[in-house]
Image: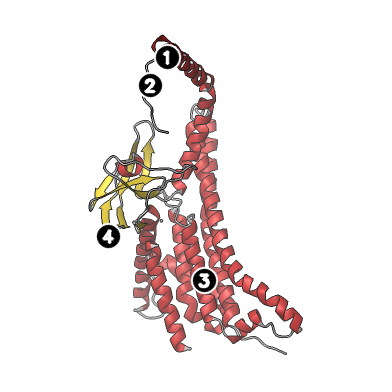
Amino acid sequence: MVTIKKSLHLLAAVLFAMMPAVSSANVDPVQQGDTVHVEQTAIAVETTEHEASHGEEHAEKSNDQFVKEYIDHHLMDDHYYSFFGDKELHKHYGFALPIILIDNGLKVFMSSEDFVYKGKVVENGGQYFKYYHGKIYEVDGPNGEIVYDAEHHPTNKMPLDFSITKNVAGLFLASLLLFLGFTALAKTYKNGPNALPKGIARGLEPLVIYVRDEMAKPNIGHKYKQFMPYLLSVFFLIFLLNLLGLTPLGLNVTGNISVTVCLALFTFLYVNLSGNKDYWKHIFWMPGVPVPMKIVLAPIEVLGMFTKPFSLLIRLFANITAGHSVVMGLIAVAYVMQEALSTPGAIGISFFLTLFLTFLEILVAFLQAFIFTMLSSLFIGSAVQEHDHH
């Protein structure tokens, strides 16, 4: 049992370390005298009338499209860390991130604004790559293009992508901040159990005690100590990432479904690798019920093993994504309606509404970290506690 517990902690540490790394042809016209000229003129006039008839409709949709693009830009992951952009100048302000590809060997280069946003082809190791809708494809040459199938899906080869994207950079930043904060807290306890934390450690200690006394102890029982490192890591990582998503850094890490899947997977592994014989008996052969009911309940309990982590990942992903969409949407609407909101009263209403929702998002940031950690401790407790059978 001791060997299993040590292996479990080692496996979780390796998985946490790897998580950031885990992405019609033109035909020349035939000259046919005046007939061709008349046809081309008619087509040009028809095209002009068509564009004029839809001009107002396009203008009406432009604001809606801007709001949608503004929200999507905040929610999406990216290979270039862009803080904001100028739509008229086609300029993005940020910094490049490393591109790491495996395609006939290791290919490493830095992304650029032209590569990500302007379709520039990059050559590396004799191969050419092009960026399209958040993914990197291999093309034939320096002027190569993306080839599409009948449904307009790219058919170009995709290399294995292990790049440091915007979300991965956010994970590294959060990990660094947590490491510095908890290192400061650990140094405090070296001075004795009664030493008073200082600085950031003073803010971390009440949260550590809260996780221990309100989540771990009530739900897991006397075995809570061996699961405290995982519960503290999950709580503070989610909480900090949620807070970073409300800053001008533009991060949306916990709004990425792949990140929430990884976090839920860790809970799934902890629950099932720590489960005792009573836990597995309640799943496959429920005690205290007739045999026919045992046969019926077994597949339901097996399904429940997977629905629990699924509910964790969907809840975190949906709530964070929805909150960010609302806040970013209000900011974008205030921007495109700046003429209508030019009066001081309208500007004040927009500002205070956005400020209120931002404070509400801070509460949601803590609440989602609390719910994920609380349910994880509850699931772990159900797997490790002994059951009385009378």
**Which residue is denoted by mark 4 in the rendering?**
106
Closer to the eye: label 4 or 1: 1
- Image quarter of the C terminus: bottom right
At 52% from the left and 46% from the top, the residue drawn is 325
Quarter where residue 162 is shown? bottom left
**Mark toward the start of the polypeptide (2 vs 4):** 2
Amino acid identity at mark 3: Thr
Label 1: how many Cα within 10 Å (few below 14, some 14–19, many 20+): few
Closer to the eye: label 3 or 1: 1
Label 3: how many Cα within 10 Å (few below 14, some 14–19, many 20+): many
| Residues at marks 2 and 1 touching, judged by CB atoms closer than 8 Å | yes
User: What is the C-alpha distance between the residues marked 2 and 4?
Assistant: 46 Å
Amino acid identity at mark 2: Pro
Q: Residue 29 — which label? A: 2
Residue 60 vertical position relative to residue 12 in the rendered view, above or below? above
Residue 218 is at least partly visible in this image: no
Amino acid identity at mark 1: Val
Closer to the eye: label 4 or 3: 4
User: What secondary structure is marked by label 4?
Assistant: strand
Who is closer to the viewer here, 339 or 300?
300
At 34% from the left and 79% from the top, the residue drawn is 190
User: What is the C-alpha distance between the residues marked 3 and 2?
Assistant: 64 Å
Coordinates of residue 37 in the picture (x, y in percent): 41, 12
| Residues at marks 4 and 3 touching, judged by CB atoms closer than 8 Å | no
Who is closer to the viewer here, 216 or 359?
216
**Mark toward the start of the polypeptide (4 vs 1):** 1
Coordinates of residue 17 in the picture (x, y in percent): 37, 68
Q: Residue 36 — which label? A: 1
Coordinates of residue 347 in the picture (x, y in percent): 51, 33
Coordinates of residue 72 in the picture (x, y in percent): 47, 44
Who is closer to the viewer here, 13 or 370?
13
